[in-house]
Amino acid sequence: VTGKTFPVWMKENVFKPLNMDASFILDDADRVIPNLAASYALTGHDYSKYSDVLTAYGSSSMYTSLADLAKWVIHFQEMIRLKDPIFTRMVQEGSLNNGEKVAYGFGLEIGSEQGLKTISHTGAWVGYRTNIRNYPDQHFAFITLCNADDNDLSGPYARAIAAVFLKDQFKGEEVDQVKAMPTRALPVTVLKQYTGDWLLGPPANKVFSFTVDSGQLTCH
């Protein structure tokens, strides 16, 4: 259609205009990628490295960084705000042959969470896991990235992240009940009982350190 290869078109029309200097479409599986976070699979208690020799445009083969994805998300939200026709087309819900609407636009999932509109999509290839979730009415978005397949970035983790920033705007009876719960101040002597290093089990398998700072229990 354009007379140019997909990697070249993406560089000229997306990556370069948005200064996404670390982003590119991989068209050679033998290419050495500096600073690459390799992807891993968890088998039992051991990790093994995934071999990725696929170059599949669109569904995979795009390499980027968190900083570059942030540039894209900021641009995406601005284009939605300005009602750019290309971007509004992306979030237009599809229809089945019988006229029934489906919660999927042109490459994006349209939904709601705790009464707030969401525009999102996940990604998964070999051990890589990605989730970009937009809350357009709140002008808020977050990105989660992982290079191992032992996680659920689209499930409880995503909802927990949203709650940290948007819980005061959540809607619904259950949310109202949570908001109505009293806030209790605990003595420092009680808080100190929970300090130290704590292991969060599967699928996260991550150690969190808790300390008491200025009378509050803080996680690091």
Image: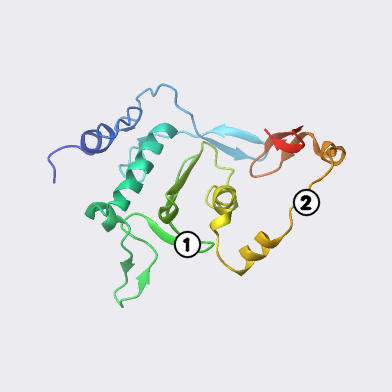
In the picture, the disc for residue 218 is none
Q: Residues within 10 Å of mark 2 (few under 14, many from 20)?
A: few
* Left or right: residue 44 compared with residue 31: right
User: What x and y, as percent, mark residue 19?
Assistant: 30, 30
Identity of the residue drawn at 61% across and 69% down: 173
Amino acid at circle 1: Ser
Q: Is residue 119 above or below residue 194?
A: below
The residue singled out by tag 2 in the image is: 184
Q: Residue furthest bottom?
A: 98
Q: Nearer the viewer, mark 2 or mark 1?
A: 2
| Residue 57 appears anywhere in the view | yes
Q: Secondary structure at mark 2?
A: loop
Residue at 33% from the left image edge and 60% from the top image edge:
105
Horizontal side of 83 relative to 216 (left or right) equals left
Mark sitting on residue 112: 1
Q: Quadrant of the C terminus?
A: top right
| Label tally | 2
Q: Which quadrant of the figure has residue 208?
A: top right
Viewer-closest of 56 and 162: 162
